[in-house]
Image: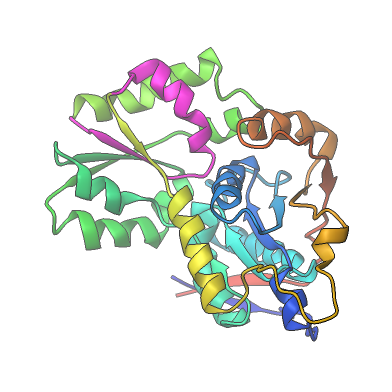
């Protein structure tokens, strides 16, 4: 199934190259899970500013139709483009699986879009038991990206890949209950068969799932090596920005001062499509591990974006 974009326009804005390099990176996820990618981006690219958009009104994406996932992702990317972002990271495995190719074709190389692929390759290369587990969403399992990487990497290496899904896990994170007893019981239920089958690595195939590491450790100790895509995505983002000359360098021309020296740069701005007041305490609980700064959440209207995505065979 191939996705294409229709009735979709992006604003043509002439931007000074210096202004463009200092523009923020847009990061999008279906909910708050993409903050795990924000954490890696901030650590790896500390000079960059980030606008984070969580589609909390429609989370989770995993059980939505292919068409709806593509349309919601399209609207989100257009919204971030309209905010002046110089590139977008789609910090959602499900959204990447159904939207990455058509969005890249639409925007072209001038507006880089970086997607996610479950980190099966490093798990396969390091597995000693030759059994790897993937904790994924229904949408990621339905898409082609995971299937492709299993065929390209795991099959030739004769590594068995076992999958586990639960529609309850993303809501646990969205409600700030990622360390709760109920969440641990659900992880016990769905991951115990993988452990009993000999899986020694567990791929966290959703950006919400790095926030479950403490609960997984509470139940399984060190039985799994936990693997996620965060650092790889941050490194790829850095490579893409450098290749496009979009990374935020401290550029100074003769007779001028660096603007950031006069005014502090807002490093992280957070937006949600749902209720901002409800999202605030969840965001605070998730970012406390990597950001000491209190960050307010604002509401964004992505549905006003004139975008639609249709799926064609």
Compared to residue 32, the image places residue 78 above or below, namely below
Tell me if I can see residue 102 in this picture.
Answer: no
- Viewed as shown, does residue 209 lie left or right of 131? right
Residue 168's place in the image compared with 262, above or below, is above
- Counting every numbered tag in the picture gives 0
In the image, residue 135 sits, relative to residue 68, either above or below, namely above
Is 200 covered by the magenta stretch?
A: yes
Q: Does residue 277 appear in this view?
A: yes
Image coordinates of residue 303 in percent, x first then y, are 79, 60
Which quadrant holds residue 165?
Answer: top left
> Which quarter shows the C terminus?
bottom left
Specify the segment rendered in magenta. 198-222
Q: Is residue 242 above or below residue 149?
A: below
- What residue do we see at 85% from left, 80% from top? 255
Q: Tell me which residue sits at (72%, 63%) in the image.
A: 24
Please provide percent x and percent y for residue 216. Answer: 41, 24
């Amino acid at each position: 199934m191939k996705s294409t974009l229709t009735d979709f326009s992006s604003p043509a804005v002439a931007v000074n190259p210096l202004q463009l390099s200092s523009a923020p990176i847009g990061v999008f996820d279906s909910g708050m899970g993409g903050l795990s990618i924000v954490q890696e981006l901030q650590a790896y690219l500390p000079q960059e500013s980030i606008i984070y958009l969580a589609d909390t009104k429609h989370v989770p994406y995993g059980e939505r139709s292919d068409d709806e996932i593509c349309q919601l992702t399209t609207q989100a990317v257009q919204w971030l483009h309209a905010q002046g972002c110089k590139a977008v990271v789609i910090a959602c495995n499900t959204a990447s699986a159904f939207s990455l190719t058509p969005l890249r074709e639409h925007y072209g190389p001038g507006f880089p879009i970086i997607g996610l692929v479950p980190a099966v390759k490093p798990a396969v290369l390091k597995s000693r038991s030759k059994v790897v587990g993937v904790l994924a969403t229904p949408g990621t399992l339905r898409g082609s990206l995971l299937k492709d990487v299993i065929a390209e990497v795991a099959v030739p290496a004769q590594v068995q890949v076992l999958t586990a899904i639960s529609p309850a896990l993303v809501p646990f994170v969205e409600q700030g209950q990622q360390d709760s007893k109920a969440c641990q019981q659900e992880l016990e239920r769905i991951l115990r068969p993988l452990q009993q089958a000999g899986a020694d690595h567990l791929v966290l195939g959703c950006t919400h799932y790095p926030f479950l590491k403490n609960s997984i450790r509470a139940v399984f100790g060190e039985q799994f090596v936990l693997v996620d895509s965060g650092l790889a995505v941050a490194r790829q983002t850095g490579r893409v920005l450098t290749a496009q000359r979009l990374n935020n360098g401290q550029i100074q021309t003769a007779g001028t001062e660096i603007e950031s020296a006069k005014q502090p740069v807002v490093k992280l701005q957070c937006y949600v499509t749902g209720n901002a007041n409800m999202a605030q305490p969840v965001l605070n609980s998730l970012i406390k591990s990597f950001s000491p700064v209190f960050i307010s959440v604002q509401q964004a209207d992505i549905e006003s974006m004139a975008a639609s995505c249709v799926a064609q065979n």
